[in-house]
Image (tube, rainbow, N blue to C red):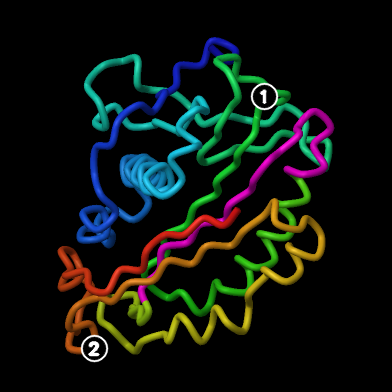
Amino acid sequence: MWEGTIMLIVKQNIMQLVEFLQTTFQDNRSSLRTTKLHKVILDEILRVKPEWKKYTWVIEVKDPKFDETAVNRGREYKIKQDGYGGTFDIDIAGFEGDELIDENLKVVILVKANNSCVGKNIKNFANTSVGEAARVFYAPNVKLEKLLFVSVLPRVSPIFENDGNVKGFDNVISYKKRSDPSNILNAQYGNKVQVIDTYYDIGDVRNKKTKSEFSDIIVENLDELVVNG
């Protein structure tokens, strides 16, 4: 294994994306939520892209609650030297063969699942995506086949006050259309990079008044996750 770090080698489908989203507002910053998100996104991608099952997949597992066995605790893969000359952490990494090294890295998946106050962060996401793509594609020892930026977003997201009350709503699709980095990324890297925005509706979203009402949501009209090429 890579530098003795214990990682989860993903082998089986555990949960579906819709199940994750039902509780997406719970423990937003927890490591357990991050682990579940990365696992379920990988499951969805391998479902629609079964030919990628040939790769060895690694995701971050920070929280032992994800699995009671110590073997499943560890960190995500880190590119040893990225395009800037530093290191770079990968949410989901696919390798050719069992040796987890930069030279064998073939697929990189970077994941976000913002669910509230999306509008104020949307341009930062676009800027970050362009920079992260450069860090991966210009890494001297990486010969990447595909980079995916996967976002799972509500079509309408709440904006919360500091006290947890809802003060308004963002039209997320409108914001995304005005800050889509796809054209820039495709001009630089062609079909080796793809921005995937998967949208869903929060049931009865505009009638909810407080953050607590979002703790267990009804997920409706979830888009199919599509990987091109």
Q: Amino acid at mark 2?
A: Arg
Is residue 150 located in the magenta-colored stretch of the structure?
yes
Indicate left or right for 197 with 115 as reference.
right
Instruction: Tell me what residue is drawn at x 52 percent, y 41 percent.
Output: 91
Is 198 part of what is drawn in magenta? Answer: no
Please tell me whether mark 2 sits on a helix, a strand or a loop.
Answer: helix
Type of residue at label 1? Asn
Q: Residue at x 28, y 36 (%)?
A: 13
Residue 161: give x, y in percent of width and height: 34, 80
193 in relation to 217, above or below:
above
Tag 1 near tag 2, CB within 8 Å: no
Other residues around mark 2 within 10 Å, as few (<14) / some (14–19) / many (≥20)? few
Q: SS of the residue at dot 1?
A: helix
Label 1, label 2: how many angstroms apart (C-alpha)?
47 Å
Using the image as rendered, state which of residue 139 and residue 122 is in the foreground: 139
Binning the other alpha carbons within 10 Å of mark 1 as few (below 14), some (14 to 19) or many (20 upward) gives some
Residue 111 x %, y %: 49, 52
According to the picture, the residue beneath numbered tag 1 turns out to be: 104
Camera-near label (1 vs 2) is 1
Residues in magenta, as a range: 136-154
Measuring 17% from the left and 83% from the top, which residue is drawn there?
A: 204
Residue named by callout 2: 206
Please report the residue visible at 76 percent of the width from the left and 58 percent of the height from the top.
Answer: 190
